[in-house]
Every structure is written in C-alpha cells, then in structure tokens.
Amino acid sequence: MTSRRLESVKPSATMAMTARAIQLRREGRDIISLSVGEPDFPVFPHVEQAIVDALRKGQTKYTTSSGTAELREAISDWMFAQVGVRYAVPQIVVTSGAKQSLYNACQALLDEGDEAVIPNPYWVSYPEMVRLAGAKVVELMLRPADGWAPHADDWERVLTPRTRVLMFSSPSNPTGAVWSAQALEAMARALEKFPKVVVLSDDIYDKLVYGGVKCPNLLQIAPQLASRTVLINGCSKAYAMTGLRLGWACGPLEIIAGMNKVQDASTSNASSLSQAAAVAALRGPQEPLESMRVQFEKRRHLMVELLRRVPGVEAHEPDGAYYVFPDVSKILGRKYRGEPVGTDTRFAEILLEEFGVAVVQGTAFGRPGFLRLSFATSEQQIRGAMDRFARCVAALA
C-alpha cells in the first residue's frame, strides 16, 4: 500500500527508545532516560515572557511561509555576529525545527540517482532524509582514533561526479566531535574538484562546546564555498526550546527559494508563537545559554569519569554537543542469564528492560558496538544511571 521509497526508510531509533522509556514509566517503572537529545533546563525567562506577550497580542495567525521578517532579520544579525556572513532576509527560511530545514534541503536538491555523502557515525535521520528524496547514501567512515574527524584523503574515496550533497554536523551527534579548522580546510580543498556539490552544515550544537575548544564554522574557514553552502541552525539545543520546534536555514537564494517551495507544499510556516520566542532568544541576554553550557561541561566530565570505571568500556570525552559515545564492543558476546548478548541493540534492551536505563544503540548511528548516552540531565540522574550501567555490565557473565 505504501511507496517503494518508504520501504527503504527506518523508524527513528532515538524516538523508539524514548517512547519505550515513557511507556515503562507509565507502567510504574523507575526509568532514567539518557536517550533523548534534549536539555533538561526550562525555557529562558525572557523567552517565556515573549511567548506570553505574543499570545496576549493575538499573534496566533499564519505568518509568511518562510517566517516573519522580524525573526529573519534577527537571524541575519545573529548569524553575522556568530559566523561573520551577512545573509539578506530572502536568503533565510524559518522552519519547524532544524530537522525540517535538513529535510527541505534534501527534497530541494536531490533527484533519483544522485548521491549524498554523510560521515559515519551520523545522526539517525540523515540517511533517511536522503532516501526519502530518492537518492543514494554514501558513507564516509570515521575513526575514533582520529577523534571522529576525517583525514584529508578520505574525501577522495567518497566524492564522485554523482555527488550532489555533503551533509555533516560539527559538533557531532552522536560523537560530540568538533572538526578542526584543518579538517574543514581539507574538506574544502577536496570540494574544489566537485563544484556541483552543495554542503549542508548542521550547526545546531555549535554553542555547546567545552574545555576551551573552538568550533569553527565552515564559511569562516572556506568563504569561497558560500555560493554552495547552506548553514542550518535553530533554538532547540542552545536555547532549550526543543518542543517549540524552531529552526532556520541560510544560504544561496536559489536553494533557499527551493526549500521554501517544499515548505509551501508541506507545513507552511513555523508556529507564530515559537517565532516570537526565537526573536527574544536571539536578541535577548545570552547569559542563560552560557550558564547551561557550564553545567553541561560538568556533567560531561562526570559521565565520562564514571563510564571509564566500568571494565570493558572505552569512553572518550567529547568536545561538544551533549553525548558520550562509548565503545562497548568488548562486552558484547557475554551472556545475560544464559543468553548471549551479541549486539549493541540487545545490550541496550537489557539495560532498559532489566536495569531501567534508556540509551540508544550505536547501530542506529551506523556504528555497531557503541552506545549513545546523553548527559543533558541532572548529575543525580547521571550518577544513578551509571550505577545501574555498571551493575548491568557486572551481570554479564
């Protein structure tokens, strides 16, 4: 009954694990969730007030599909301050979350037979967006020994005349890796040979970096790519506004116009109240963002420290985002109550069903043998989860 294209698309593993954790809680189970990529902080007070004010003013009607002029002007100013590139209002489209920007871009750019290069590990939705556009996913395999960053010669193996899109995120979901200026320069040099490739730079975690690490933007390193680069960002992560679903894309006028066509034919405008909230977030005080980032940095260190105490687990300290991506491959193959635990998926199931901790298996991100754990939760929850995690590993014979 459904299309052949849909048959190639996998459900979101992160959403599935979160849904299962919610169901177990409804059944009365004590569940600690490290599966969802969502700050546990409330919306900032001035953002909350902006929503209330917009509601009282009756700002509950349709806006233009691409977003209000007020918000796109705020995005233009914010992007200029952050990246150093000035985008005109028509070069900006506001979407229902950064995820919709990525989806719209794939629909606007990809045709049957095209290829899209995606670094592996990847966010679970990247390959599915490409497949829904009818294109082929080409994976660039990254290595933990390299800090999950590509070598200069890696690009030669994946870029071809059929490549139409290169989609990446730095900081990365799921690894938290931040690509250096040198890594971005090497990518830009490789792209010189492939002038038809459009870069989709998912910058949603760029304000959440730790340990004094800098997160360079691609266009700061390679401004010559501006004519074929779309920068995608939003309010979900840095401003703790995940449920308000507010993202945006900035780029060449022709591509942004194409993305807006997709939006016209699908969702139309993002929530009017969320747009008012975003103006306040971008133009208002930024101290709450920094306060949240500092707390995340402490939690990052705590989670990695506790993971490293578990025999058989290898955990690196991420430079950005709010995920740890530990290697649990040495644990796999052991038995739980006589049953071989052969996959990271089965390990994650046992951890949730038997020990009450929700994580996401690395297989969902293209990398079996790993797990993704979110530290966007309280220190108390992290300590409790890591205690259960250690007991789960100890129970594997």
Image (cartoon, rainbow, N blue to C red):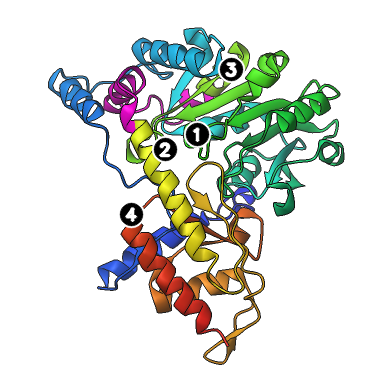
Foreground: 225 or 290? 290
Residue named by callout 1: 204
Foreground: 260 or 212? 212
Span colored in magenta: 261-288
Q: Residues within 10 Å of mark 1 (few under 14, many from 20)?
A: many
Q: Mark 4 or mark 3: which is in front?
A: 4
Q: Which mark is residue 251?
A: 3
- Mark 1 vs 2, N-terminal side: 1
Q: Mark 4 or mark 2: which is in front?
A: 4
- Is 262 part of what is drawn in magenta? yes
Image coordinates for residue 221, horizontal then vertical, percent: 68, 20
Q: Locate residue 15 relative to residue 291 in the image: left or right.
A: right
Going by the numbered disc 3, the residue's amino acid type is Gly
Query: CB under 8 Å between callouts 1 and 2?
Result: yes
Q: Which mark is residue 378?
A: 4
Real-space CA distance between mark 1 and mark 2, rounded to the nearest whole angstrom? 7 Å
Q: Label 4: state its secondary structure.
A: loop
Going by the numbered disc 2, the residue's amino acid type is Lys
Going by the numbered disc 1, the residue's amino acid type is Ile
Image coordinates for residue 76, horizontal then vertical, percent: 46, 12
Q: Which residue is drawn at the image coordinates 82% and 21% (left, top)?
A: 192
